[in-house]
Image (tube, rainbow, N blue to C red):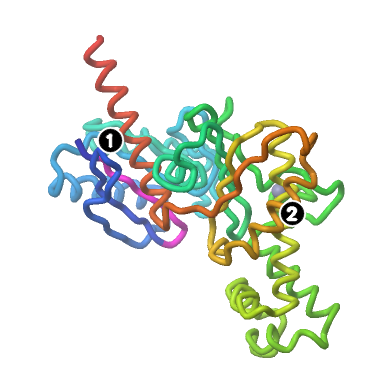
């Protein structure tokens, strides 16, 4: 049995054929069409192409940036694809492929979290929280070995935990959300404010930014931090601190045994994770009298989301197969 995993991004669609051991057999990439109908048609084409390679494809998993409803079939909102408002993506695709196999749609952060849980840094944990530090802060929660989606598919939006009353305005319209203080954009913002506060120490960051503070990017801050630059280390210390504070808030509700941190900036390793570990304990209730969760860097690599959604598709295909046998 094989599954087809599809990751729909704002600019490109990546697809891969996976076997039952969650190993990728073949991959492609195409540009993302601009209309919902265009995307549906391309997904159907990908399925037909994939079937030529692996005629026994029995499930399709789609990872999408956005909010996926509790039915795991409908995208309620996506910042990348503006026409996806309560869009029945799974119904549309299943109709185009004559209902040959089931389609599961899942939020991209949940897919990456599930990938880490089954074959990355989350492996072996009982209750895991993954936090992805990207442009924003994504989350995924695994409880007792199952992906936790909430009642309406909206669980694990850790980036929008209200951390600071009346704090910075977030892209979601609320204020003081965690991702305003721990994300790739927060890293850039802390580094820029450090440059303004300590201009006499800003030579290296300003050099990397080509002399313009507004051109400073996260990768430059990472590079300077690896070289030991004070201001870059300060910026990582700040987002690390807020990462740890966010973890302690999540621990008050979920009490996980492991936090997995993903996203581009985690390649910096302990420069980010040590302040996160320190502040997690600092703000953890009854910290002296309870075990502390492990805080680890993601390990499943850039394919984590594809692996995760391929596995979810496999489970769905098996469940449907079993219910047909029982019927
Ligand atoms: Zn928010």
Instruction: State the image quarter where residue 191 is shown.
Output: bottom right
- Work out whether residue 292 can be spotted: yes
Q: Nearer the viewer, mark 1 or mark 2?
A: 2
Residue 206 at what x, y percent from top left? Answer: 70, 86
| Residue for point 69% across, 70% down | 188
How many numbered tags mark residues here?
2
Q: Quadrant of the C terminus?
A: top left
Of the pair 215 and 308, the residue shown nearer to us: 308
Q: Quadrant of the N terminus?
A: top left
Above or below residue 50? Residue 76 is above
Residue 127 shown left or right of residue 275 in the figure: left
How far apart are the alpha carbons under marks 1 and 2?
Answer: 39 Å
Residue 152 at what x, y percent from top left? Answer: 57, 28
- According to the picture, the residue beneath numbered tag 1 turns out to be 59
Residue 56 shown left or right of residue 115 in the figure: left
| Residue for point 60% across, 48% down | 295
Residue 51 at what x, y percent from top left? Answer: 16, 44
Q: Secondary structure at mark 2?
A: helix
Of the pair 286 and 202, the residue shown nearer to us: 286
Mark 2 Cα within 10 Å, few/some/many (few <14, many 20+)? many
Residue 95 at what x, y percent from top left? Answer: 29, 34
- According to the picture, the residue beneath numbered tag 2 turns out to be 242
Q: Is mark 1 within 8 Å of ligand 1?
A: no
- The part of the chain drawn in magenta is 3-11
Of the pair 214 and 80, the residue shown nearer to us: 214
Residue 91 in magenta stretch: no
Q: Main secondary structure of the magenta part?
A: strand
- Work out whether residue 173 can be spotted: no
| Residue for point 58% across, 59% down | 134
């Amino acid at each position: 049995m094989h599954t087809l995993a599809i990751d729909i991004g704002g600019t490109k669609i990546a697809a891969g054929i996976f076997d039952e051991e969650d190993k990728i057999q073949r991959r492609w990439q195409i540009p993302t069409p601009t209309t919902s109908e265009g995307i549906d048609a391309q997904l159907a084409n990908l399925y037909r192409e994939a079937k030529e390679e692996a005629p026994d494809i029995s499930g399709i998993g789609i990872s999408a940036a956005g909010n996926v409803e509790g039915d795991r079939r409908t995208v309620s909102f996506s910042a990348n694809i503006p026409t996806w408002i309560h869009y029945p993506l799974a119904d549309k695709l299943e109709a185009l492929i004559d209902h040959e196999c089931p389609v599961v749609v899942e939020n991209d952060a949940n897919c990456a979290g599930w990938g880490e849980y089954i074959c990355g840094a989350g492996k072996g944990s009982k209750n895991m929280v993954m936090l992805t530090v990207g442009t924003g802060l994504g989350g995924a929660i695994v409880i007792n070995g199952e992906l936790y989606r909430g009642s309406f598919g909206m669980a694990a939006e850790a980036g929008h935990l209200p951390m600071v009353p009346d704090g910075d305005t977030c892209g979601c319209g609320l204020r003081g959300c965690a991702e305003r203080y721990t994300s790739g954009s927060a890293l850039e913002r802390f580094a820029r404010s450090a440059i303004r506060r300590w201009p006499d120490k800003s030579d290296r960051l300003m050099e990397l930014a080509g002399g313009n503070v507004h051109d400073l990017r996260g990768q430059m801050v990472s590079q300077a931090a690896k070289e030991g630059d004070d201001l870059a280390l300060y910026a990582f210390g700040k987002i690390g601190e807020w990462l740890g504070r966010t973890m302690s808030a999540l621990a008050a509700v979920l009490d996980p045994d492991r936090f997995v941190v993903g996203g581009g900036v985690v390649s910096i390793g302990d420069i980010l994770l040590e302040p996160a570990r320190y502040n997690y304990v600092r703000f953890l209730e009854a910290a002296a009298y309870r075990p502390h969760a492990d805080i680890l860097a993601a390990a499943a690599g850039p394919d984590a989301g594809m692996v995760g959604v391929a596995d979810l598709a496999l489970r769905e295909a098996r469940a449907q197969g079993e219910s047909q046998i029982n019927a």
